[in-house]
Amino acid sequence: MKRFSELLLNLIYTSSRNDKITHIMNWISGSETEEIGWGLSVICQELEIPKVKSSMVKEISFTHLDKYLFELSYDYVGDMAETISLIWPEKINKAKKFNKASLPQVIKDLKNITKNEAPELITNYLNNFDQNTRWTFLKIITGGLRVGVSSRIAKIALSKSFNKDINEIEELWHAFNPPYRELLEWINGKTKKPNVQNRAIFRSPMLANPLEESDYKLINPSIYLAEWKWDGIRIQLVSSNGYVKLYSRTGDDISKSFPEISSFKFKQSFSLDGELMAGEIENPGTFNDLQQRLNRKNPSKEIINSVPTFIIAYDLLILDKIDLRSKNILERRKKLKTFLNIGKFPFIKYSEEVSYRNFDDLEKKRLKCREDFNYEGLMLKLKVSDYQTGRPKGPWYKFKRDPFNIDAVLLYAQRGHGKRSSLYSDYTFGVWKNSSSNKELVTVGKAYSGFTDKELVRLDKFIRTKTIGRFGPVREVEKSLVFEVSFDDIQKSKRHKSGLAMRFPRIKRIRWDKPACEADTLETLEKLAN
Amino acid sequence: MKIDWIKKSREGVQIKNGLFYIDPIYPVKNAVITHAHADHARPGHNQIFATKETIEIMKERYGANFCEKFTAYDYNQNFKIQDINLFFAPAGHVLGSAQIVINYNNQRVTFAGDYKRQYDPTCLPFEPIKSDIFVTEATFGLPVFKHPDANTQIEILIKSIQKFSNRCHIIGVYSLGKAQRIIKMLRNKGWMDTIYMHGSLVKICRLYEKFGIDLGRLEPATVKDKPEKPHEYYKGKLILAPPSALSDVWSRRFPNPILGMASGWMTVKQRAKQRGINLPLIISDHADWHDILKTIEEVSPKEVWVTHGSEEALIYACKKKNIKAKALSIIGYESDTDI
């Protein structure tokens, strides 16, 4: 456990990608297979400990620590695991049984424990680890590791350590659960390559790059096909030997959240790439509608009926156990169309092509994409391209609609979490509401991103010196700073006081120069929502 | 306890209707100053009362005209401002740092200024003085802050320099106090190599030496006058610089350095990560949570006032011990931004 903690610390404080890979390789070279498997599952954030939740850890802390001081500390540090690891009283004589426990031992203990036994076990570990190991232990439970390592980097380190092809590892990765025993035994050279053909596994999707101005000249209808960019979530629908799985873009199994799709009895085996949408094929809903269905593990019948979902399919990876990914997109889509025509699935729609004459024509379509239906923009796909894992530059582009921009006034600030911990980085902003008698600022949204680290330091200082009120962790600031806020969409909403809900608001520019009285009005925003 | 001769004003804490101020933020007639850090010791006052080290550092930083008139005192030397009796007691924060102990109306009020309880070879240790009212900072006033013994951090630094002998180390330090403390602690551990410095650190180091603190071989971290390329020359060397220089173009003249920072804030991992720090060293010139509580116990005041920092937690902890406590919430001391 200590060695793994040291690895995580090294990763946090290393900025170079190559150095990170070296750190992981060093750790792999001194670890046994089982330890490698569990460790990678922590780094890739794929480990699940269903019986022990963050809330349980928090409760245990309250029995040992003062609740009020804990809350103040947590607000300051911005990370539960780190707060508890720092605040936990240090025991002088540590018990070897816990202090020297290996990573696999700790994880097995956490997985096998009953709910009643958990508090005692967790307390024993917290008492007997040193501070950094406590932090690692708590991170295993709470998740949200943030050591700046993507699962891609971890897999590269693995492939380099054992001289195996990274693509082969990627392909097999999702077929196994932590600690990936069969996968690692093959990588280690102990067994033959496992056969996963018959499983409904997730395959890493192909991702698109944003279309930059310098790419415009490449776009030509004989080279790139265009489709609408649908405003749902990217999914992969896989059927194999009677098993049906729905995966999110990152490979999370979300089948249970959408039983109307995953309970369908497909006759063929296939893997299909598409967009999950709210509503029905003939009457699609908005992203706001879809949000009511996301993150619900056991949706009720009522919600399934009131907010049904369907799929817009744009690519086909596998059909009848034949891997189509090396074929070009025109062939794949032809097969997809035929497959859907024959299957006549009531909840899958083919994503039609958008025809265009030239780039200018396409640009006109993009500018109008909010008009008849709220498309997120356009997708452009190179007609001769095969299906590649990751985000290769060139074959796929996204050409998004322009965001809305408004000028809003900073009203409140709160300390951030994770990367931005202990700095005031969560901003609530508002616009002017004019009534007959007076003018007041009403809250319309919150933004956490869009500024550089340097700007964050300046904003943090501004907030500390311009505080006019404090409500627990929230600071009310002098109403004098204007943000230019970008957002993708705005809709009427009963949940918010202003009656509006913004989609993905972020700070485009900080207008240190602009007086607050020149910020936008609620009326302007209401017009955008209509 | 009723104290009507101390008030909070825009300038800072005011004694007896403006007779004098403690660490005033704006220019005043009479200023009594705890220590020479820029947010506490500002130029432009009419008359300054401080320890002689603090006066010398202010002169060095602001030039001879930093105030109209000054009076320098030794620690524990009694003096008067009108009918108010005062003396300075060591605060252990930086060279010359002092607590201001005021006796008036049969009451004793001690302003601790910034202080620490850990060992520092460059200044006198903090002396707890029994007082009716203890005015404390709370820069690290949360139980998450438990600064390790600074010696362990110096050992980490030395080990890192030895391990990465083909790279140079640039450590971000405050130019007054932290820089000299780290140098002296390295010397006390027998690490005698030349230490290279950002230009802004040189003056204060020389001044410390004038006060009899031997810092060993120091040189400016220049590149043009060196016989080899910076990459070759600075291999295995230690450079100290103010924190702001780490992210500045200045640090880019040294290829592939290991960036460190010596600060109490380095306790919070993500805070260190965000600053791009590879080697966080938890070395602070402020008392941590446990030392603040220990100090309050030793001073055993009837009431605690908190000037700046994380006041809520400290006030709560005092009340739990049946000590009255309140926040002065003085704005202008850079307690929370001094990374």
Image: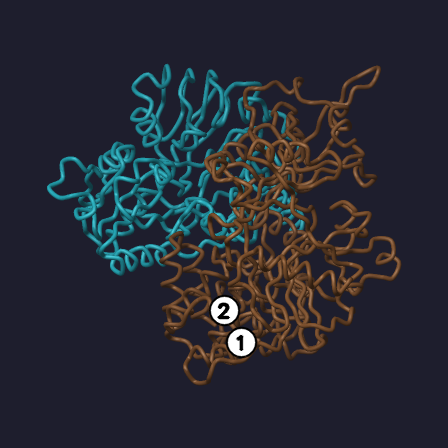
Return the residue found at the far bottom.
Answer: A191
Residue B166: % across, % down? 22, 55
Residue A180: which numbered mark, if any? Answer: 1
Q: Is residue B11 left or right of residue A301?
A: left
The structure residue drawn at horizontal position 39% and vertical position 55%, both measured from the top left corner, is A17
Nearer the observer: mark 2 or 1; the answer is: 1
**Chain shown in brown:** A
Q: Is residue B106 visible?
A: no
Where is B127 relative to A362, above or below?
Answer: below
Question: Looking at the rendering, in which quadrant would you find the C terminus of chain B?
Answer: top left
| Badge 1: residue crowd in 10 Å (few <14, some 14–19, many ≥20) | many
Looking at the picture, tell me which residue is in the foreground, A265 or B4: A265
Residue at 43 percent of width and 79 percent of height: A32
Q: Nearer the viewer, residue A301 or A333?
A: A333
Task: Tell me which amino acid carries mark 1.
Answer: Tyr
Whether residue A77 is visible to the viewer of this picture, yes or no, is yes
Callout 1: SS:
loop
- Residue A137: image location, x then y, percent: 55, 67
Residue A234 image position (x, y, % from top left): 65, 54
Residue linked to disc 2: A40
Q: How is the image coloured?
A: by chain
Give the chain letter at badge 1: A
Q: Compared with residue B332, is residue A7 higher up or lower down, i.e. above or below?
A: below
**Chain ID, cyan in image:** B
Quarter holding the N terminus of chain B is top right
Residue type, mark 2 in image: Leu
Asked if the residue under mark 1 is in contact with the one under mark 2, i.e. CB atoms within 8 Å, the reply is yes
Residue sitting nearer the eye, B6 or A312:
A312
Give the side of residue B46 with respect to residue A427, left or right: left
**B155 left or right of B236?**
right
| Disc sitting over residue B163 in the figure | none
